[in-house]
Image: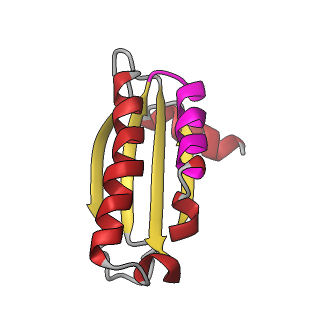
Amino acid sequence: MENHKYLLTEVWKPRASWLALREDERRIYLNEKMGPLLMQMISKGAEIIGAAVNENNTAEKIDYLYKAIWQLPSKELSEELEKGVKEIGFYDYFKQANFSGQPIGPEELMEHMINS
């Protein structure tokens, strides 16, 4: 994680407004709005380190369908990404929750859990 000092995990699921769009309308939105935003973030040093469709069937499954995990060079770029997602109207079509922070190791994580 040389130049990546910040992690952002996004989880989201479609709203009725997305489901109401035709396939071609969805494709246009993703190509014309989401694609350029992603390329802009990548050009600034952000990296998508993983994305997935939720296949979890356990009782602890969260009620979100998609996930993306980003490595970013700074908290500021993470905030810029979140702002950009809002500006392109993503939240009009998807319900999203975010989790972000500096990467830490297991020992620091457990220490924080003990002291919180």
Q: Quadrant of the C terminus?
A: top right
Q: Nearer the viewer, residue 85 or 59?
A: 85
User: Residue 33, can we see it?
Assistant: yes
Q: Could you say where residue 80 lies in the image, as x and y percent from the top left? A: 57, 33
Q: Nearer the viewer, residue 105 or 97?
A: 97
Q: Residue at x 52, y 38 (%)?
A: 81
Answer above or below: position of 73 versus 26: above
Q: Could you say where residue 45 lies in the image, as x and y percent from the top left?
A: 37, 22
Q: Residue at (48%, 42%) from the top-left corner?
A: 8
Residue 62: x and y, percent?
Answer: 47, 74
Q: Is residue 67 left or right of residue 85?
A: left
- Queried whether the magenta region covers residue 31, the answer comes back as no
Q: Is residue 3 above or below residue 22?
A: above
Residue 26 relative to residue 111: left or right: left
Magenta residues, as a range? Answer: 73-86
Which quadrant is the N terminus positioned in?
top left
Above or below, comparing residue 97 to residue 87 in the picture: below
Q: Quadrant of residue 91?
A: bottom right
Is residue 94 at least partly visible in the picture?
Answer: no
Kindly report the secondary structure that dominates the magenta region of the rendered protein.
helix
Position of residue 3 in the picture relative to residue 10 (left or right):
left
Whole-percent x, y for residue 63 in the image: 48, 77
Residue 105 position by quadrant: top left
The mark tally for this picture is: 0
